Amino acid sequence: MEIFIENIQDKIEVTDEIFELMKRAVKMCLEHEKFEYPYEVSIILTDNEKIREINFEQRNIDKPTDVLSFPIVDMYEGVIKSSQGDFDMDEGRIILGDILISMEKAKEQSIEYGHSFERELIFLLTHGVFHLLGYDHDTYEREKKMFEKQDVILKSLNLQRH
């Protein structure tokens, strides 16, 4: 398994501890789903302006958002639906996709919701990972299922809401 994290912003400091916490959270999401294949996930930490640009390019929404997920493998609730997708044959890994997180939004929302920056960041990250795995919040039932999965991971990392 490979988890790549690229920090392309300079507004919020990112410590080695935060990088390690993020990697642990991704691994826990995939272990929780019993995802048995070697995988690759890319995470890009960005700022409000860059995520706004990408949000506009990809979704025609001209405002910053907190997290964007770009799944590569066709999955539905943790199950691969198609053999089409990006498989790195040299490394023998499935490339699940990319997650972009606005560190500025994460900081703003942590203050707004009254919890730690780490809690908000990992909430956004797990949200992105579950989107890569084919979970969504397009119906009440699916949203409940997705958020329950996120809560399990946050609780395991002692980052639940108080």
Image (tube, rainbow, N blue to C red):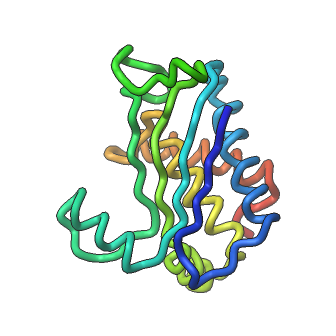
Q: Residue placed at 72% from the left, 40% from the top?
A: 28
Residue located farthest toward the front when viewing the structure as drawn: 90
Whether residue 106 is visible here, answered yes or no, is yes
Give the percent coordinates (x, y) of residue 65: 38, 70
Q: Is residue 23 left or right of residue 10?
A: right
Residue located farthest toward the left when viewing the structure as drawn: 60
| Quadrant (top left/top right/bottom left/bottom right) for the C terminus | bottom right
Give the percent coordinates (x, y) of residue 78: 51, 27
Q: Is residue 57 left or right of residue 40?
A: left
Q: Residue placed at 61% from the left, 20% from the top?
A: 37
Q: Residue placed at 63% from the left, 24% from the top?
A: 38
Give the percent coordinates (x, y) of residue 146: 51, 43
Whether residue 75 is visible here, answered yes or no, is no
Q: Is residue 60 above or below residue 110?
A: above
| Quadrant (top left/top right/bottom left/bottom right) for the N terminus | top right
Q: Is residue 56 above or below residue 143?
A: below
Residue 142 found in image quarter:
top left
Q: Nearer the viewer, residue 109 or 16?
A: 16
Q: Is residue 88 above or below residue 2?
A: above
Q: How many marks?
A: 0
Q: Is residue 50 left or right of residue 110?
A: left
Q: Residue placed at 57% from the left, 84% from the top?
A: 11
Residue located farthest toward the top when viewing the structure as drawn: 83
Give the percent coordinates (x, y) of residue 75: 41, 27
